Image (cartoon, helix red, strand yellow):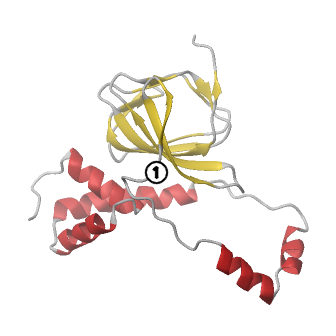
Amino acid sequence: MKHLVATDELREQAALYALGALELAEAHEMESHLSEGCHICLAELDGFAGTVAALALSVAEQQPPAGTRGKLLSKLNVGHRHEAAASLPRFLSIHGNEGEWLDVGDGVRMKLLHMDNATGLVTSIVRMPPGASLPRHRHRGLEQFFILEGDCYVHGEKLGPGDYHWAETGSVHEDTYTIDGTTFLLVAPEGYEVLEAR
C-alpha cells in the first residue's frame, strides 16, 4: 500500500531503516514496500540516507603517532592474522528488544550500542520522557545526535524526527529538553562536564 502523507511513524521507520537499525523482518517489509514504488517513503529514505552518510564523514581525521604503521606491520604475520580473525566478531546486531536500558537521571534512559576504545566514542540510544531536560553541560569531544522520534529543543532550536545536530569539543549546551518526549541516536565521548545553571 502506497502512502499519501508522511507520518511520524513512517519517518521513524525510514530513519531506522537508513541507520540499519530495523529488525530483519521489518527491514524486509520495508524493502518490499519500497520496491512497490511508494514515493513518500522513497523521499523520506532519500533524505535520511544523506544524513546517515554524513555521520561517518563528520568525524575529524586523526593521524596516528609516528612509527605506528611500522610497529603494526611488524606484529602482523600470517599466523597472527588467522588467529585474530578467528577471535574477533565480524558482525553484531542488537535488536530493539535487546540490550539494557540504563537510568541516567530524571527519567532519561540510555542503551549502549557500541564503545570504540580507539576513539573513546560511544554510540547509544537515548530516551527522554515528556518534560525531561539535561543539565547545562560542556562537551568533552564532538557530540552528534540524530532524532528518531519526538521533539528535542537544543541550543534554542526545535528538532524533530530526521533532524541531525552536532556540537564541537568544548562547546556548551545551555539547555536541552523535550516537551512531548524524544528518542535519539547519540554518538559522543562517554559523559560530559556538568556545569552550574546560570
Please identify the quarter of the rendering in which residue 30 is found. Answer: bottom left
Quadrant occupied by the C terminus: top right
Question: Residue drawn 67% across and 75% down?
Answer: 87
Vertical placement of residue 99 versus 191, above or below? below
Residue at horizontal 59 percent and vertical 71 percent from the top: 89
Image position, residue 186 (x, y; %)? 50, 45
Q: Residue at x 16, y 66 (%)?
A: 38
Q: Is 155 or 70 nearer to us in this picture? A: 70
**Mark 1 closeness class: few <14, some 14–19, many ≥20 residues within 10 Å:** few
**Residue 83 appears in which quarter of the rendering?**
bottom right
Q: Secondary structure at mark 1?
A: loop
Which part of the image, by quadrant, shows the N terminus? bottom left
The location of residue 79, given as percent across then percent down, is: 79, 87
Q: Is residue 118 left or right of residue 65?
A: left
- Location of residue 59 by image quarter: bottom right
Above or below, 136 against 171 in this view is above
The residue that label 1 is drawn on is 99
Indicate the position of residue 125 as horizontal and vertical percent values: 45, 45
- What x and y, as percent, mark residue 12? 29, 50
Q: Nearer the viewer, residue 48 or 100?
A: 100
